[in-house]
Amino acid sequence: MSAVVTIEEVERVAELANLELAADEKPRMQRDLNAILEYVAQLGELDTSDVEPMAQVSDLLNAGADAGHGEALRPDALWPSLDRARVMEEAPETDGAFFKTPKVIER
């Protein structure tokens, strides 16, 4: 295992994510983050030199479906949008163009 996440780093990540961790949660979070990093390090050791890079997996999905394996993605279809005026009429609180919602993030 290369890097080890410290409790101080767990606290900093929690702060950046605006999470409040109880004292007993910090060691568990440390263990989980270290396990994730260890798994990613293992993935980094895999020999992928014979694997062709991909930007999309949809080609694999569709090719697999054509061969009788798995699901294909549904074809794109155009659908009419909802009427904004009618939607705004049904909204509990609006300014006519946008929904108004209560503040959920306090800093």
Image (tube, rainbow, N blue to C red):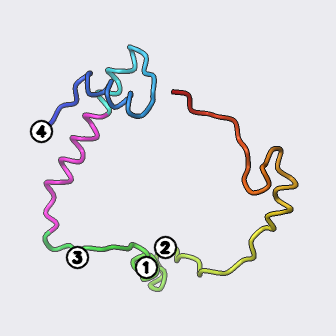
Q: Are marks 4 and 1 in contact (CB under 8 Å)?
A: no
Q: Amino acid at mark 4?
A: Ser
**Pointer 2: what residue?**
70
Q: Secondary structure at mark 3?
A: loop
Q: Amino acid at mark 1?
A: Gly
**Numbered disc in front, either 2 or 3:** 3
First along the sequence among labels 4 and 2: 4
Q: Are marks 3 and 1 in contact (CB under 8 Å)?
A: no
For residue 2, which numbered disc appears in the image? 4
From mark 3 to mark 4, how far is it between C-alphas?
Answer: 27 Å
From mark 2 to mark 3, how far is it between C-alphas?
Answer: 21 Å
Q: Residue at x 79, y 64 (%)?
A: 84
20 versus 101 height, above or below? above
**Numbered disc in front, either 4 or 1:** 4
From mark 3 to mark 1, how far is it between C-alphas?
Answer: 17 Å
**Numbered disc in front, either 3 or 1:** 3
Residue 55: x, y in percent? Answer: 33, 73
Q: Name which quarter of the figure residue 30 lies in.
A: top left
From mark 4 to mark 1, how far is it between C-alphas?
Answer: 37 Å
Disc 3 crowd rating (10 Å Cα; few below 14, some 14-19, many 20+) is few
First along the sequence among labels 3 and 4: 4
Residue 106: x, y in percent? Answer: 56, 28
Q: Are marks 3 and 4 in contact (CB under 8 Å)?
A: no
First along the sequence among labels 3 and 1: 3
**Pointer 3: what residue?**
52
